[in-house]
Amino acid sequence: MLRSRLTQAACAAQRAFSTTPKVLAAKQMTVRDALNSALDEELSRDDRVFLLGEEVAQYDGAYKVSRGLWKKYGDKRIIDTPITEMGFAGIAVGAAMAGLRPVCEFMTFNFAMQAIDHIINSAAKTFYMSAGAVNVPIVFRGPNGAASGVAAQHSQCFAAWYAHCPGLKVISPYDTEDARGLLKAAIRDPDPVVFLENELMYGTAFPVDDKILDKDFLVPIGKAKIMRPGKDITIVAHSKAVETALLAAADLAKKGIEAEIINLRSIRPLDTATIFASVRKTHHLITLENGWPQHGVGAEICARIMEDQTFFELDAPVWRCCGVDVPMPYAKTLEANALPRVADVTEAALKVLGGKAGKATAALK
């Protein structure tokens, strides 16, 4: 019943954005189709690649990310599994140790908790424990973080959980470019990669060009992207929170404040160079994430700033915008208030900037 509810929620995860005529004229691709095309191309490119997970084959995936792949590649490459995350994650890790390149799909990363021993103790540590003799080229992927109406046990962000562990690479894509380029890079990577998608972004379409659609298009793991340049304050975010950051930046621009938005893309390794360079320019920093605050991604960024000379470039303390430190409520109104909203980010920016925000607003008049 719960998994059916998650599947129904996925079908309802359609979003629309107002766009300029130039963007409307460009090619569009949803995040779902970006992931699907990346899987298709990598399956075609390398016979060692295969996909396994619950409902990935005959049902085309709970979120239709694997649509059409079973019909194209058959039972040996697209494998339906029983509902046993510990079982099929262990099979996938063993296959990777034997030289294959499995893509292990979790219907949601909340269910990956059943398989966390294989992810951490088997996949992440084997290269080190074998003195570099055994690589584990595996991708663990699926929706992560808050969705809609699935309550406390199915709304957690696992970015900080997995980024804590040496031996893993942890990716958190936002848009079509991220999803397509980073998934292809993850599948080709020699190390285990945790690939944290977002259910609510699957149906969102973004402009794409021929470069992004090229079969060899890759986004380097460990490199952040500046989504919007700015000079007054830096806002660092990942996954769906990037959308919140961009909307907050548009709101701040009306007040004469130019926010620089950084899409982390990669949680481990973390692109501190891009963050530090931005802070040296803006002298103010907000971290934004939908996960909990304690020991979170934002907390790690704060620590990295403190331990670097960039700390002395700050004109105000770093401000964290995070999910509320409670299990996710089921009630719709409470759920909305348990996650950072655009107004929260805008208010945080005004507080961090202090008197500078007032001067910027005055300059507009």
Image (cartoon, helix red, strand yellow):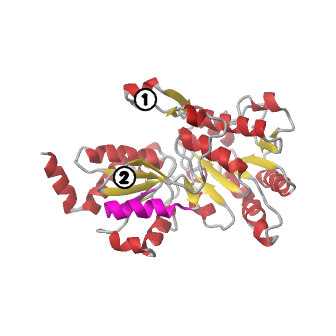
Specify the amino acid type for callout 2. Glu
Percent position of residue 325, x then y: 47, 62
Q: Magenta segment range?
A: 270-288
* Residue 150 found in image quarter: top right
Give x and y (percent) for residue 262.
44, 53
Residue at point 39%, 55% (across, down)? 235
Residue identified by numbered label 1: 23
* Numbered circle sitting on residue 260: 2
Specify few, some or many for label 2: CA neighbours under 10 Å numbering under 14, 14-19, or 20 or more: many
Tally the numbered discs.
2
Residue 337 as seen in the image, left or right of residue 50? left
**Residue 281 is a magenta residue:** yes
Secondary-structure class at tag 2: strand
The C terminus lies in quadrant: top left
Image quarter where the N terminus lies is top right
Can residue 363 be seen in this snapshot? yes
Residue 231 % position (x, y) = 30, 55
Left of 61 or right of it: where is 337?
A: left
- Label 1 secondary element: helix
Cα–Cα span, label 1 and label 2: 21 Å
Give the image quarter of residue 314.
bottom left
Q: Is residue 325 left or right of residue 141?
A: left
Q: Residue at x 57, y 36 (%)?
A: 212
Establish if 237 lies above or below 216.
below
In this rendered view, identify the residue nearer to me: 233 or 80. 233
